[in-house]
Image (tube, rainbow, N blue to C red):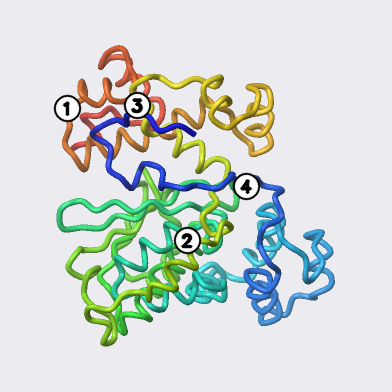
Amino acid sequence: MAAQAGTPMLPPGLLPAPGEARPYQLDTPLLPWGEQGVLLAEFARSRELDRADWLAAAGVREGQLLSPRQLLALLAPLADCGPDAAFVLGRAWLPGHYGLASQALQQAADAREALRLLCGHAGRLTPLLTPRLLEEGDELLLLWTDACGLPPARRGFIVDLHVAAVAGMCDWLAGERLPWAFCFNRGRPRELAHHAVHLGAALHFGAQADALRLPLAAATRPWRGQAGAAAPPLWRQALEADPAGRRRGLLAALHDWLAPRLEQAPTLDQAAAAFAVSPATLKRHLAQHGTHFQAELDQVRALCAVYLLLRRGEPSQSVARALGFFDAANFRRFFKRWTGLTPGALRR
């Protein structure tokens, strides 16, 4: 995909990383059984699920490469194994046993470096959700966006799993509980006990995105005698040569392509050409992921709008122009439809 001039107000974390490989889709076999598969099998055993029935229900054989759809099928019954299931699974998810990527995470000097590694190799480490790291002033913000589509009924469970995975890994490597704040793009649950026990008290529901926030001072504090350390050059060279880790899910790759082109009002035909498929094929692929082009364009617009309004304090007119709207009134109508709030109400 040829590079184009990006929307200047958007931060690097919302734009594509260089050297992306071909996107994977819901039914792309790419996850070795010995990685996420073994982890889930061990959790299923601990919750006394019948292994053969569990695998059969997911249509999975031990030892095979898993697709994201099969990973979701394996996770579905585990989500019903108690209100703590997402958090217990999450605590075991990272650093994990995913080859060089996991070992590099354990070599990170601090939380910021670990989160950068996570974002760069999400295809191997977090194949269902794509993390995007933003650094604004004195705070880091890790946003979660769809990699290749999640069933709405399971989204909360998957988000909780990933949030617990990142916070748990960083707390363990730091040797202390870091001062995280957690934002959830859903309503407040009736029972918060497990969120509070596993994540802490800084829980914010009804947010416009699923995200973790961490003060920059805590994110750059060296871990366990790692002052001045960094992953050895050989690790970095090997990681750069790992194409599986750098792959993006189809929706994440589409978001990468859309974000720097919002001001030019990108079209389905242009996106299809960039992905070297026909418009009909791209439409079909998106439908297989439970979505369509306009919905994904609106999703990216809404996420960028919230960032520019809240984090950058940009006026509505400037945001409307950056996101490809003809005028601020059209932008306000879109924003109200997508978020339920006007830009002014969001700021308040």
Q: CA distance from mark 2 to mark 1?
A: 40 Å
Query: Disc 1 vs disc 4: which is toward the camera?
Result: 4
The residue indicated by pointer 2 is: 240
- The mark nearer the N terminus, 4 or 2, is 4
Q: Give percent across and percent down for residue 293.
A: 55, 27
Instruction: Name the kind of residue labelled 2 in the image.
Output: Glu
- The mark nearer the N terminus, 1 or 3, is 1
Give the quadrant of residue 139: bottom left
Q: Are marks 1 and 4 in contact (CB under 8 Å)?
A: no
Q: Secondary structure at mark 4?
A: loop
Give 144 or 158, whichever is nearer the viewer. 144
Give the quadrant of residue 201: bottom left
Instruction: Name the kind of residue labelled 3 in the image.
Output: Phe
- Describe residue 37's horizontal placement relative to residue 192 as left or right: right
Query: Disc 2 vs disc 3: which is toward the camera?
Result: 2
Give 154 or 226, whichever is nearer the viewer. 226
- Describe residue 169's horizontal placement relative to residue 157 as left or right: left
Q: Are marks 2 and 1 in contact (CB under 8 Å)?
A: no
Q: Residues within 10 Å of mark 4 (few under 14, many from 20)?
A: many
The residue indicated by pointer 1 is: 315
Q: Give percent across and percent down for residue 53.
A: 83, 69
Q: Are marks 4 and 2 in contact (CB under 8 Å)?
A: no
Q: Secondary structure at mark 1?
A: loop
The residue indicated by pointer 4 is: 24
Q: Give percent across and percent down for residue 206.
A: 36, 47
The reply to whether residue 157 is visible in this rendering is no
- The mark nearer the N terminus, 3 or 4, is 4
Q: Are marks 2 and 3 in contact (CB under 8 Å)?
A: no
Q: Secondary structure at mark 3?
A: helix
Query: Disc 1 vs disc 3: which is toward the camera?
Result: 1
